[in-house]
Image: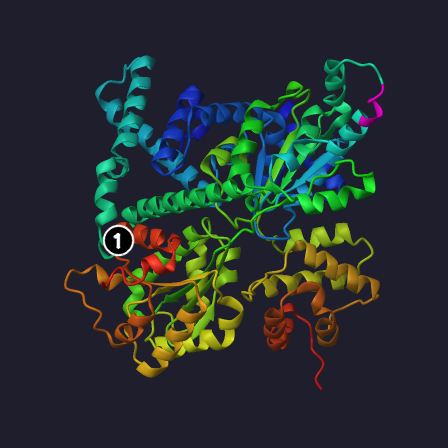
Amino acid sequence: MHQPSLIAYRTALSANMLYFCRFLRNKGFNLGPSEEADALNAISLVPIGEEKFFRQSLKTVLAKNNYQFNAFNDLYTEFWDQYAKAVNSKLKEDQPEKNTLSDAQKKEAQFNALKDWLNLSPSTEEISLHSYSAIEVLTKKNFQDLSDDEMLLMMSLLKRLARKIAHQKSRLKKRTKKRRIVDIKRTIRDNMRYGGEMQRLVYSKRKDRRLKLVLLCDVSKSMDLYSRFFVHLIYAFQNAYDKIETFVFSTALHKVSEMLNNHEFEKAFDTISERVPHWSGGTTIGSCLLDFNLNYGHSHLDKKTIVFILSDGWDTGDPLTMKAAMKFIYKKSRKVIWLNPLAGNPEFSPDAMGMKTALPYIDTLVSAHNLDSLKQAIHASVKRRDIMKNQFYS
Amino acid sequence: MMENAELDKIRKLLLEQDYITEDTIAMAVFLALKLEKPLLVEGPAGVGKTEIAKVIAKALDSELIRLQCYEGLDSTHALYEWNYQRQLLYLKMQENESKSIKDKEKDIFSARFLLERPVLKAITSKKKSVLLIDEIDRADEEFESFLLEVLSDWQVTIPEIGTISAVHRPYVILTGNRTRELSEALRRRCLYLWIDYPDFEKELAIVNAKVPGIDAKLGKQICLFMQELRKLKLEKTPGISETIDWAKTLSILHLSHLDKEVVERTLGVVLKDWQDMRKTTDALSELLDKTGVVSRIG
């Protein structure tokens, strides 16, 4: 069948552009009127008739991040294909009945077909997802039960959360900046060379206490459901802390900080699981932690470092190894926070051998099965050790 | 067609500066110039993000003003600062003159005591300039919001002088490595371009443009090798700049082809991480096979 060219349908270009933008918005693009105006401006600048330029210009204007940039071509094709189909089918339906349709009626039919298609697309679900009550539910929902769509929303919630902490932290920084005081001794000494004329002020400032974060993430089979989520968590943490080192372990320990730093997070997970053997294998937490202590302990742990361990505590190794390793980490670090997804269960008690052994050397044990508990974990990381000690098991 | 000619012109201009482009890059630059919107360029390290700004500045024959971002960068480093020492000295010199305090104040808060930092410089520049805000993701979020203000209004308020509005809106290029997620608000103000590692043809074209005297066979082998090397999943995947460095090095050594010994000796130009070095050396024979280099036995 002869496929009419897309351009022929671009009768009312600006209206169609708005439909396209709406379509993209449903796909998660963050577009407002100003972007729509930009898009219209852009296509007025590029040569007409050459579809490639049309697409490229829209891509430049409408995509706002790497993910959207790469997905754009497919979405573009999808839209115009569907568009052509919607218009065609409507035309075919109408034709046998009334061949005498006026142009205006035809146009309206096209318009309606398009509207139907735009409104009946999966967007209905997505819209309901974005309501507030959904967020409320989500923060309580176990990660295990999340659908893909919910996962996406969860990511954005988590990102916002991390950003919030980042802001909290930056406020702290500002305060110390204001407390910048003139160091009189050094000011006088430095200004001696100007004949005692105060020309240069020397300030002293409280030294920034920078928190560092070490993340030890269990990626064994038993943690499979959660580890994907934790990668996102790690990415979110990057906003809030100055220095993060990330390790994953199951039967062996791997440093993955660089992989996370150099890749966008959708890719990071795949890269890591590809490069780290035993991903989703069994666990020997104790020996992995010991390995960490031996190779990285001295350079990565100090009293400014918060250690997050993400694991369910199912250790198949020797409890004594575990004990020694945990003791070392506890002593060397500022705080140890253990995130255990199983702890969300009301019947949970730290029965797993590894968990039991580790317990005395943990400042806070937090369940990490839903967003609320993660919030708790993040807040716990901001507080100091002595206050936090044994709060969970008092 | 008029517009088409302009798009071509941009491509040609970029090409003249030895910047090999793809259509997407040319289009992004074209639209950024035409719509006068900032262009946010992201991509892995060493693929020529910063180079775009330099090339545009050269092609348009305008000044390139660069703001290198880092953690803790604040508006005094980006916008302006009063030259405090100079003001003091000036006051001291004026001590015995019978000027009113008001005049003195007017004097010391005048343009000549103002240290212009990149953003202010770009705004007050007499000609349209290119403002390169490099590695924006390294700056703090506060700086990002500060930048938003400037990028939307194109004016800067200095309490002692007043509001300075842009004479010419500069062309703004922002680059980032995605070490931190940029705010939605900033993204929305910008056009977006993602540059990835080049394919073989593009990389070869770049090498030939940047290292004119290079042996044709050597150039080809280098690019093939780099393409294979990037598949190795290294800690720090080498970018185009490493390819060019390497090509230059081998060209200076007057080599006409790669062999195992040469690669081993010069690998430090390409790889900057010892683990990567080790990994690559281990896989070298295989890599060279894939590249089509017959490795000498023994």
Task: Identify the coloring.
Answer: rainbow
Span of residues in magenta = B92-96
Residue that appears at 55% across and 37% down: B143
Q: Quadrant of the C terminus of chain A?
A: bottom left
Residue A258's place in the image compared with B112, above or below, is below
Q: Residue furthest bottom?
A: B298
Horizontal side, residue B114 vs residue A326: left or right: right
Q: Mark 1 belongs to which amino acid? A: Asn
Q: Tell me if residue B94 is in the magenta stretch.
A: yes
Residue sitting at x 38%, y 70%: A279
Which residue: 58% across, 28% down?
B150
Q: Quadrant of the N terminus of chain A?
A: top left
In the rendered image, is residue A305 in sight?
Answer: yes
Mark 1 = which residue? A370
Subunit of mark 1? Answer: A
Image coords of residue A195 (percent x, y): 82, 39
Q: Position of residue A330 (x, y in %)?
A: 39, 69
Residue A83 in the image, given as x and y percentages of width and height: 36, 31
Where residue B92 appears, as percent x and y from the top left, is 81, 27
Which element is circle 1 on?
Answer: loop
Q: Is A103 situated above or below A331?
A: above
> Chief secondary structure of the magenta span?
loop
